[in-house]
């Protein structure tokens, strides 16, 4: 058998039950030529080693970081430790669908010069059941409508579309390490680090390939970092700061359409209004007021 070309790297801190489901989803792949790396960033659960040992497979490696590296540090460690040409950062609370490896490897064969490959995702709740999310539904209308098996994103047009609404589910991305080079996630961010990387790749004229097939289950649940950072407004504060930076960078590059979209921040403002309305309906008026104040930023 040829050496595996793809590593599933799981940055882990807590959530052992969901991690087990994530690992099982790797073993459920229709293609078995993969490696699995679990990078434990000082997680508090002593049962982690026993859980991983139960799978007893030479393709699986568990690494304990010597110190807590934070999200960006652990994500970068996953990229650096992977010894295969392709790396997917599988989130510890998500699951791959059985076809993920097959569709990604086919996309790489069909488009070998792309920097990253992403697929469509289904959104599920903590029990794995379909979950409705209005922002996710809106993004379906923002993303390019599929024509054939793939969508190619590159240049200003791609960046402009992403600035109108980030329709790429970050953990679905498979990175081609040789094309990624030295670019990594920035420790300046806690929420937008994935969007920061993808937008700057587009600014550097990299090519993305979207796979127009669902191959990933993205889990939204109460302890999800997205939920936490939405409630405490950190996501919006970081998004506003990043969009301001991107507007300046687009102006220097002469990408005026992308600059205007970044400056307008329409998708951020719409989400702030939606979240403020949701907070109001739940009786969380102080949270709603604080979100509305960000509209003037």
Image: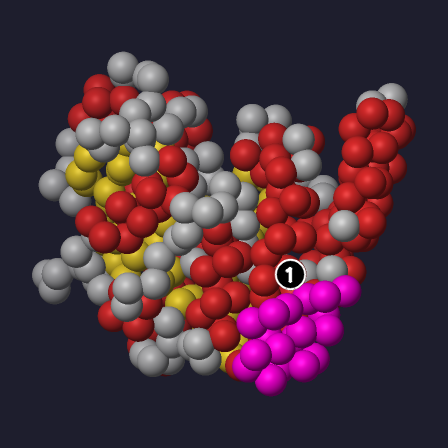
Residue 247, image x, y percentages: 64, 69
User: Residue at image x 35%, y 57%?
Assistant: 184
Inspect this view and state whether residue 134 appears. yes
Count of all numbered marks drawn on residues in the image: 1
User: Residue at image x 39%, y 53%?
Assistant: 185
Could you tell whether 270 is left or right of 198 in the image?
A: right
Q: Which residue is mark 1?
A: 244
Could you tell whether 234 is left or right of 37 in the image?
A: right
Q: Nearer the viewer, residue 252 or 53?
A: 252
User: Residue at image x 31%, y 30%?
Assistant: 68
Q: Nearer the viewer, residue 146 or 143?
A: 143
| Residue 60 found in image quarter | top left
User: Residue at image x 83%, y 25%?
Assistant: 286
Inspect this view and state whether residue 99 appears. no
Residue 225, image x, y percentages: 54, 34
Q: How busy is the neighbourhood of tag 1: few (under 14 within 10 Å), some, or many (20 plus)?
A: some
Which residue reaches farthest top?
A: 46
Queried whether the magenta region covers residue 190, the answer comes back as no
Q: Is residue 240 above or below residue 16?
A: below
State the extent of the magenta-drawn residues as a range: 247-264
Could you tell whether 153 is left or right of 240 in the image?
A: left
Quadrant into which the N terminus falls: bottom left
Q: Is residue 286 above or below residue 207?
A: above
Residue 107, image x, y percentages: 39, 72
Q: Main secondary structure of the magenta part?
A: helix
Query: Could you say whether the residue bearing mark 1 is in a helix, strand or loop?
Result: helix
């Amino acid at each position: 058998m040829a050496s595996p070309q793809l590593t599933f790297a799981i940055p882990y801190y807590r959530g052992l039950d969901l991690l087990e489901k994530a690992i099982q989803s790797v073993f459920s792949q229709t293609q078995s030529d993969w490696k699995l790396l679990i990078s434990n960033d000082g997680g508090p659960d002593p049962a982690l080693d026993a859980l991983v040992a139960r799978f007893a497979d030479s393709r699986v490696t568990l690494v304990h970081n010597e110190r807590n590296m934070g999200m960006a540090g652990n994500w970068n460690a996953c990229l650096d430790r992977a010894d295969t040409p392709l790396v997917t950062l599988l989130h510890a609370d998500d699951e791959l669908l059985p076809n993920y490896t097959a569709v990604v490897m086919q996309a790489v064969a069909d488009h070998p010069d792309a920097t990253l490959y992403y697929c469509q995702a289904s959104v599920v709740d903590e029990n794995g059941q379909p979950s409705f999310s209005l922002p996710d539904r809106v993004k379906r209308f923002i993303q390019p409508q599929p024509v054939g098996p793939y969508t190619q994103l590159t240049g200003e047009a791609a960046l402009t579309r992403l600035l109108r609404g980030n329709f790429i589910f970050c953990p679905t991305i498979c990175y081609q390490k040789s094309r990624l080079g030295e670019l990594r996630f920035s420790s300046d961010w806690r929420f937008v680090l994935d969007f920061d990387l993808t937008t700057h790749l587009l600014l550097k004229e990299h090519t993305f390939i979207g796979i127009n097939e669902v191959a990933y289950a993205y889990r939204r649940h109460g302890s999800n970092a997205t939920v936490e950072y939405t409630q405490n407004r950190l996501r919006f504060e970081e998004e506003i700061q990043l969009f301001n930076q991107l507007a300046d960078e687009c102006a220097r590059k002469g990408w005026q359409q992308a600059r205007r979209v970044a400056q307008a921040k329409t998708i951020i403002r719409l989400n702030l209004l939606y979240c403020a309305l949701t907070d109001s309906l739940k009786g969380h008026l102080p949270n709603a007021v604080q979100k509305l104040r960000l509209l003037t930023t």
